[in-house]
Structure formats: structure tokens, C-alpha cells
């Protein structure tokens, strides 16, 4: 009799770490204390740009009780490595953004540190700062050397610009000729400019770590150990090897229970982990370094602000002929992950549409704002916002419905994406759109609200967005990562997964155990997963890019199949085994061979090819596809826009854990709603002025509408049992769907987010319609961006 595979892929078992969290037994970094532990703090810059002239220490503090770390104390390189070594671990001379770390302090009393930080006085020679994309571009265009804040020549780039890409839908010369012809023949040429703001990740648990350092008899650093809240332990290992000039095996990193991340703990733990380890090195004690909310919000990374410009050529019957797309993001003061974020923004910019000719040019600019970094969606929400707003604008201009315009241009099975990637696996956006609009009652509401809005001060509307998101690292990224997983047998015969993929609320522990359970044909409860400790687990790649389920899950599946083969060959495990027979075979094998470890390394599917130079080819192994429908109410008396219902339909391959998957989508949609109409980072000379939860307004559960989650399942060959990634998808669609709905409700198109009541007020009153809602925009007169030319 075969084993009952309870809890495998497609079921919704209890989360592996759920019991500990519910009972309060889970230990986060601030729950942990070590004997003799000190506390750390960071002294930060108060200016945006300048030179450090002098540092003095106030007499009111007994400084001999404190450990003080400066840039000159760093034993290795003074750099936080991401992609470029431009980011200092500690500022030595130059200041490039507010809240930049300059000194580190440690003391046995956390309270004493607060007074000490305030007693450090730093004098500067201040220089003019740059705080917007436009200022950064202007400085370059004007050749203003005093405002060149990032010397690109040091890093193979250009002044003030971290990275550029140019992506064509074919051979460059042919596409340029095709674009020229398309714009010559077009019935309509529609242009638009769309902007998105920064967004704070706002995880529940702030950044925090504890570091220890071991020295040899001569006082040299022998090894360092950092444990803390993070997504990517091996990122921190890499950072420590450079800061301490140590080999990788001497830099151990352990992920402890992590209270949310959303990308905010992908790259930043390399900073705080290095700082805590430096303090531990100098004071000779374990050091805990945790940020409070205000410090975390002011000093750590956020979503990149962006500007997307589109110029599109369209026929009068709605056929897209060509597009010129420009995407620009604000990277902040240092490069960090901006080139990778820009890459995602570039590849996703053409969306799920057939473009005979398209050119995407993109760039990441430097400003004197704290560096921006990873955030769910990773660039795609920015460029897709511009595209999906623009599709509604094209529809309005040429007199088609938004639905019909999209239906006439959707990609389908067998078509090629803008990078030239053939869509081999099934794609049916027509079906997804039909179902999503039906689920939302779209057509009935469009008609009903058009009547009701004539007399009501509350204008209601419905809008939608259609989009896709690539799974895994871009192009050849997975090949370079060369991820490795292990599957061991524990002494009692239970399988144990060893990966560096981390759990931070999204369900990694659970879905990977489900993948193993299904492949091993065992109950889910029998599968265990090791804590991510780099001295124990292999590097299975970072926990980012919607890659865990599809890429790592597939590796786990293969390792499990290897284990079955080994036990079958050497321990007589029968086909169609029971759990008891598996245990007996495992113990028999261990009795004879002492241990069993199955290891699997990533091997790219042979048909996947990506050209990094031309930016063409197979950008991802697979894509998830979606249609999101938003319903809104805009009160023309308070100028407040509210999302009143949301329907999210997505095709994500096989759904591994329906309850967790639904939760992922609901959470992502909630973040997307915040991104669209609530969350605004207010900058004052580069410093985040509203760095508290009392003045950074995010939606609470009371502000969110009913979110209806729908799935379509088209299994992919690339994931375990057909699964694809879903984590970033729900961040892409809400913002354009909501603003499309607001335009449907009011007749006014808004192209910048976040869209707050004051923005609506200013727009309505500037149009001479203080009560709004009755305006009918002439599509030939674009008040928000512009329609360049209308020939029909």
C-alpha cells in the first residue's frame, strides 16, 4: 500500500514554523542575548553632500567606556559590495547622503548609547546636493562639474548614471527603421509620461543583527559570525569577506526568525552585519545592533522612484505598430542593486503585448538620497505602471475600450516577447481577461456607474491592468548563481532539506517541504528543513525574484528523486512504498553507509539562451500572467479616492499551497494599493522627513477592500509539479488598475503615484471643476502629459 502523501503540492498543510510563532516560542534577533553582549549604535551624517572637516566628542560622555569604530579601523576594504564597490562601509571623508554611517559606537548599556550618539559633533564643508532625477540629468547635460555626484568613469559607467540599457525587439538597425516607418504610417501617435514615488518596505521587524568575532593570539581577526534578520545569508558572507579580508569559510552567517522583508532585507543586512562585526572586533564582546523604526525608515533602502515615457504608434483600428519607451529610476547615492532593478524594469516595460517594433532605453541615475534597493516587484511595478496607464490613454485617444485595445494586441502561445523569447508554454491572456472581468462584474458596473455618477458626489469606476512577471533571475542569472541544494537523511531516517533559501513570512519552509514530500511520496510532516546557517547549508541562491518555488523547488524535487533511486538501489525500497517502508530502507542504508546526502546543482534548460550584450533572448525560464481589476470610489467633496473592491486573477502554474498562495496575493495587492493611493515618502534635502509610522501613511486592514483572489493553473515544466513563482506578481498590477479606475470614475487621468487627496484637489481645481466628475476630456488635449500628434 502506497504512502498517503498528506500535505504535498496542492494541499494546504500547517506552516512549518507556524506553531512556534503562534505560541510565542519563535525567537527574533531582539529576543536573543549572549553572555557579555554589548549594544551598538550608528553615528550618521546630518547633511546630504559634503566633506567631513572635523569630528569631536563632547565632554559630557566618558568616552573611555565606549568602543568607537572609524573607517580607519576596517581591516579589509572599506566597501559594502553589491555589484560595484562604490558604497563605503563607513564614510571616511566624503558624505553623499543624509543619514550616512560615519562612526560606530558600542557600550554595555543601550541607554548610554543614545546620549553618546548625540554627543558626537561633526563639522562639514557642505556641497550642493541633487535630489531629483531631473536635477541629476541637468547636471550632466550642463557639464556642471560641481553637481556631478557620482564619477561613473571609475566604474565603467558615465557621470551621475549607474547603468543604462538599450533593448530592441530585433536587430537594432532593423528595429530603428521599422520604428521610423511605423511612426510615419501611424494613424495616431500617443505619448505619455508617468511617475512613481519611493515606497518603504515597512516590514514588522526592523533590521537587527548580533555579531561575534574571534581573534588569534596576535590579535588578528580569525573569524566572524553574524546572526540576524535577513533574506540572503550568502550576500552578507560576501560582504564580510571583503570588510575583514577573510576567506568565505571564516565568515559564518545565520538567519534567525525574520519578521518580514519584502526586499528590504536583501541587500541592507550587508551594511548592518558588517557594522556589528566591526564593533565586535574592536570591543571584544558580542554586539547587538538593532534599529528603531525611525532609524530604519530614514537610513535603509526603499523602492526606486521612477519616470517612464512612452511614444507609441497605433492604427485607427487599435493595432500597435511600434513603441519608444524610456525608463529612468532614481538609484540614490550609491549603485547598490540599481542595475538589476533597472534590468527588470526594462524587460517588463513592453508588457504582455505584441510590438512589431519596440525600443526600450533605460537608465539609473544618482542623487543625494539614501540608496534605493530591492523591493517586491524589483523595477517591474514602475515600468508596468507607465505602460498600463498608457494603454488606457491610447484606447481613449482612438476611441476603443481599454478591453478591446488589449485584446487586439495580446501575446499568445507561439508569439515572441519583446526580447525575442518564444512563448512555448501555453499563454491565454484572452481567457484570463474574460474571466477576470466576469468575476469583477466589470461590464455591468461600467454601465451602472456611468448613470449613477451623473448625480452622485461620489464617483465610482472600474479599471484593470494586464501584465506578466518573469520567474527567477534574469537571463543567464540562474546559470551564474549555480545554485546547490542538499537533501540529507537524519539519524532517525527522516529527510532534511538544506538550502540557504530563507523564510520571512512568505512560506519558504512549507512549500519546499511540500515539494520534497510529493517527490519522496511521504507525508509532509516527516520532512524537515535546516535553519539557514552558512556553515551548514549550501548556497542555493538568494531568496528573491520569485525564484524559491520554481527554481529551488525544482532542485529539491530532483534531489528527492535521486534519494528514492539510491534507497531503491542500495536498500531495497520498493516502488509504491509506504512511509514505514521508507523509514526501514533509510535506516538500513544508514546502518551500512552511515550517511546519505543527495546534492543537486542548477542546470539550465538547454533551450534557454540569453545575450547579455544585446539584451535579447530568453529573459526568464517562465512567466506568470495576470489580470487585476480594481473598483474605486472618489468622493468629490473630500477628494479622497478609495479602492472598494479588488479582483486578482493570475496564472501561476500549479498552485503549491492554496492558502499561502492566496495570502501572498492578498498581501501583495494590499502593498500595491498603498503604493497607489496612500504611501508617500516625503524628502527634505534628501532626508526622509516622515520616517515614522504616525506620518508615513499606509493602509490598514480597515482601509483595504475585499480582495478576491482567483487562480488559473497551467503547469510549467520548469517548476516542481508545474509550479511557477508568484511573490512579486501581485505588486505589479494594483497601481495602474486603480488609477485606470479613477479615470473611469472621474474622467480625469492621473499619471503619478502616490495619488493623495491633495493631488486630486489640485488637479480638479486647476481644471476649473472644483467638484469634479463631470469633465469630459478631449483626448486631443492632454492636460497631464500630452498627445503629440493626432492624424486621424
Image: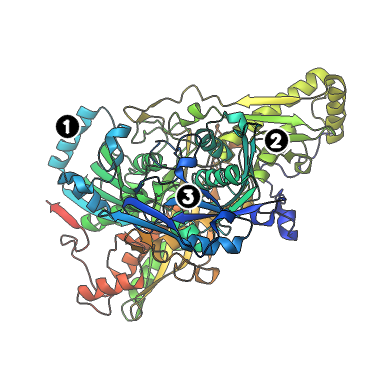
Q: Which element is circle 2 on? A: strand
Residue 748, percent across and down? 27, 67
Left or right of residue 72: residue 348: left
Q: Residue at x 45, y 37 (%)?
A: 81
* Distance from the alpha carbon under mark 1 to that under mark 2: 53 Å
Q: Secondary structure at mark 1?
A: helix
Q: Are marks 3 and 1 in contact (CB under 8 Å)?
A: no
Mark number displayed over residue 343: none
Where, by quadrant of the figure, is residue 364 drawn?
A: top left
Q: Nearer the viewer, residue 274 or 545?
A: 274
Residue in the foreground of this view, choosing between 527 and 743 = 527
Helix, strand, or loop for circle 3? Answer: loop
- Using the image, tell me which numbered label, if any, was put on residue 177: 1
Q: Nearer the viewer, mark 3 or mark 1?
A: 3
Apparent side of residue 525 relative to residue 397 in the rendered image (left or right)? right
**Mark 3 or 2, nearer chain start:** 3
- Residue linked to disc 3: 376
Residue 17, percent from left and from top: 71, 50
Q: Which residue is mark 2?
A: 497
User: Which circle, 1 or 2, is nearer the viewer?
Assistant: 2
**The N terminus - image quarter:** top right
Q: Residues within 10 Å of mark 3 (few under 14, many from 20)?
A: many
Foreground residue among 443 and 541:
541
Alpha carbons under labels 3 and 1: distance apart? 37 Å
Rendered location of residue 205, percent (x, y): 58, 57
How many circles with numbers are drawn on the protein?
Answer: 3
Distance from the alpha carbon under mark 3 to that under mark 2: 26 Å
Task: Residue lying at the far top in this picture: please name it.
Answer: 569
Q: 10 Å neighbourhood of mark 1: few (<14), some, or many (≥20)? A: few
Q: Is residue 419 above or below residue 10?
A: above
Q: Which residue corresponds to the image point at 51% horizontal and 25% vertical from the top-left? A: 604
Question: Of marks 1 and 2, which one's residue comes earlier in the chain?
Answer: 1
Amino acid at each position: 500500500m502506497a504512502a498517503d502523501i498528506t500535505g504535498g503540492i496542492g494541499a494546504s498543510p500547517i506552516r512549518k514554523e507556524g506553531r512556534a510563532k503562534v505560541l510565542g516560542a519563535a525567537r527574533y534577533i531582539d529576543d536573543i542575548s549572549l553572555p557579555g553582549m554589548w549594544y551598538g549604535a550608528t553615528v550618521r551624517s546630518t547633511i546630504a553632500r559634503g566633506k567631513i572637516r572635523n569630528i569631536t566628542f563632547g565632554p559630557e560622555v566618558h568616552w573611555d567606556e565606549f568602543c568607537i569604530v572609524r573607517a580607519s579601523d576596517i581591516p579589509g576594504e572599506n566597501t559594502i559590495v553589491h555589484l560595484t564597490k562604490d558604497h563605503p562601509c563607513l564614510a571616511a571623508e566624503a558624505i553623499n547622503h543624509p543619514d550616512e554611517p560615519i562612526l560606530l559606537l558600542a557600550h554595555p548599556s543601550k541607554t548610554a548609547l543614545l546620549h553618546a550618539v548625540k554627543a558626537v559633533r561633526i563639522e562639514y564643508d557642505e556641497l550642493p546636493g541633487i535630489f531629483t532625477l531631473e536635477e541629476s540629468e541637468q547636471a550632466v547635460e550642463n557639464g556642471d562639474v560641481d553637481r556631478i555626484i557620482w564619477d561613473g568613469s571609475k566604474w565603467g559607467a558615465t557621470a551621475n548614471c549607474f547603468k543604462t540599457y538599450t533593448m530592441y525587439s530585433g536587430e537594432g538597425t532593423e528595429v530603428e527603421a521599422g520604428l521610423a516607418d511605423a511612426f510615419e504610417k501611424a494613424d495616431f501617435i500617443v505619448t505619455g509620461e508617468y511617475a512613481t514615488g519611493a515606497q518603504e518596505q515597512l516590514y514588522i521587524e526592523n533590521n537587527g543583527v548580533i555579531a561575534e568575532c574571534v581573534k588569534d593570539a596576535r590579535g588578528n581577526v580569525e573569524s566572524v559570525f553574524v546572526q540576524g534578520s535577513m533574506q540572503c545569508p550568502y550576500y552578507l558572507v560576501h560582504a564580510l569577506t571583503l570588510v575583514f579580508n577573510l576567506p568565505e569559510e571564516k565568515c559564518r552567517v545565520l538567519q534567525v526568525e525574520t519578521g518580514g522583508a519584502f526586499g528590504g532585507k536583501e541587500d541592507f543586512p550587508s551594511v548592518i552585519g558588517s557594522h556589528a562585526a566591526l564593533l565586535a572586533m574592536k570591543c571584544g564582546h558580542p554586539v547587538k545592533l538593532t534599529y528603531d523604526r525611525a532609524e530604519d525608515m530614514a537610513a535603509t533602502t526603499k523602492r526606486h522612484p521612477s519616470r517612464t515615457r512612452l511614444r507609441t504608434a497605433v492604427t485607427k483600428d487599435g493595432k500597435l505598430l511600434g513603441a519608444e519607451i524610456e525608463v529612468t529610476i532614481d538609484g540614490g547615492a550609491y549603485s547598490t542593486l540599481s542595475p538589476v532593478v533597472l534590468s527588470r524594469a526594462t524587460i517588463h516595460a513592453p508588457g504582455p503585448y505584441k510590438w512589431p517594433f519596440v525600443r526600450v532605453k533605460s537608465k539609473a541615475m544618482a542623487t543625494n538620497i539614501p540608496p534605493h534597493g530591492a523591493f517586491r516587484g524589483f523595477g517591474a511595478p514602475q515600468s508596468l505602471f507607465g505602460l498600463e496607464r498608457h494603454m488606457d490613454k491610447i484606447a481613449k485617444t482612438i476611441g476603443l475600450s481599454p478591453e478591446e485595445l488589449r485584446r487586439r494586441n495580446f501575446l499568445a502561445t507561439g508569439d515572441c516577447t519583446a526580447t525575442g523569447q518564444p512563448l512555448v508554454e501555453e499563454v491565454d491572456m484572452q481567457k484570463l481577461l474574460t474571466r477576470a472581468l466576469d468575476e469583477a462584474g466589470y461590464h455591468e458596473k461600467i454601465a451602472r456607474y456611468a448613470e449613477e455618477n451623473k448625480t452622485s458626489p461620489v464617483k465610482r469606476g472600474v479599471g484593470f491592468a494586464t501584465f506578466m512577471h518573469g520567474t527567477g533571475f534574469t537571463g543567464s542569472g540562474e546559470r551564474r548563481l549555480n545554485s546547490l541544494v542538499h537533501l540529507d537523511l537524519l539519524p532517525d531516517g527522516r529527510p532534511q532539506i538544506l538550502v540557504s533559501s530563507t523564510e520571512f513570512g512568505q512560506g519558504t519552509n512549507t512549500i519546499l517541504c511540500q515539494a520534497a514530500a510529493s517527490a519522496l511520496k511521504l507525508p509532509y510532516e516527516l520532512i524537515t528543513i535546516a535553519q539557514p546557517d552558512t556553515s551548514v547549508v549550501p548556497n542555493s541562491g538568494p531568496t528573491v525574484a520569485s525564484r524559491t518555488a520554481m527554481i529551488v523547488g525544482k532542485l529539491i524535487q530532483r534531489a528527492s528523486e535521486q534519494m528514492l533511486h539510491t534507497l531503491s538501489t542500495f536498500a531495497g525500497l520498493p516502488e509504491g512504498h509506504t512511509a514505514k517502508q521508507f523509514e526501514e530502507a533509510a535506516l538500513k542504508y544508514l546502518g551500512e553507509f552511515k550517511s546519505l546526502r543527495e546534492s543537486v546543482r542548477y542546470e539550465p534548460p538547454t533551450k534557454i539562451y540569453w545575450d547579455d550584450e544585446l539584451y535579447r533572448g530568453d529573459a526568464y525560464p517562465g512567466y506568470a500572467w495576470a489580470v487585476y481589476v480594481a473598483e474605486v470610489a472618489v468622493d468629490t467633496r473630500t477628494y479622497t479616492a478609495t479602492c472598494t473592491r479588488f479582483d486578482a486573477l493570475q496564472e501561476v502554474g500549479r498552485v503549491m499551497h492554496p492558502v499561502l498562495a492566496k495570502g501572498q496575493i492578498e498581501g501583495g495587492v494590499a502593498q500595491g494599493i498603498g503604493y497607489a493611493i496612500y504611501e508617500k515618502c516625503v524628502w527634505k534635502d534628501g532626508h526622509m522627513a516622515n520616517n515614522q509610522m504616525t506620518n508615513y501613511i499606509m493602509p490598514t486592514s480597515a482601509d483595504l477592500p475585499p480582495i478576491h483572489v482567483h487562480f488559473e493553473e497551467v503547469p510549467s515544466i520548469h517548476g516542481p509539479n508545474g509550479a511557477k513563482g508568484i511573490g512579486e506578481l501581485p505588486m505589479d498590477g494594483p497601481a495602474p488598475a486603480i488609477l485606470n479606475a479613477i479615470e473611469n470614475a472621474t474622467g480625469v487621468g492621473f499619471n503619478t503615484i502616490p495619488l493623495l487627496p491633495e493631488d486630486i484637489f489640485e488637479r480638479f481645481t486647476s481644471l476649473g471643476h472644483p467638484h469634479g466628475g463631470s469633465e469630459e476630456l478631449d483626448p486631443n488635449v492632454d492636460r497631464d502629459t500630452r498627445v503629440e500628434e493626432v492624424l486621424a
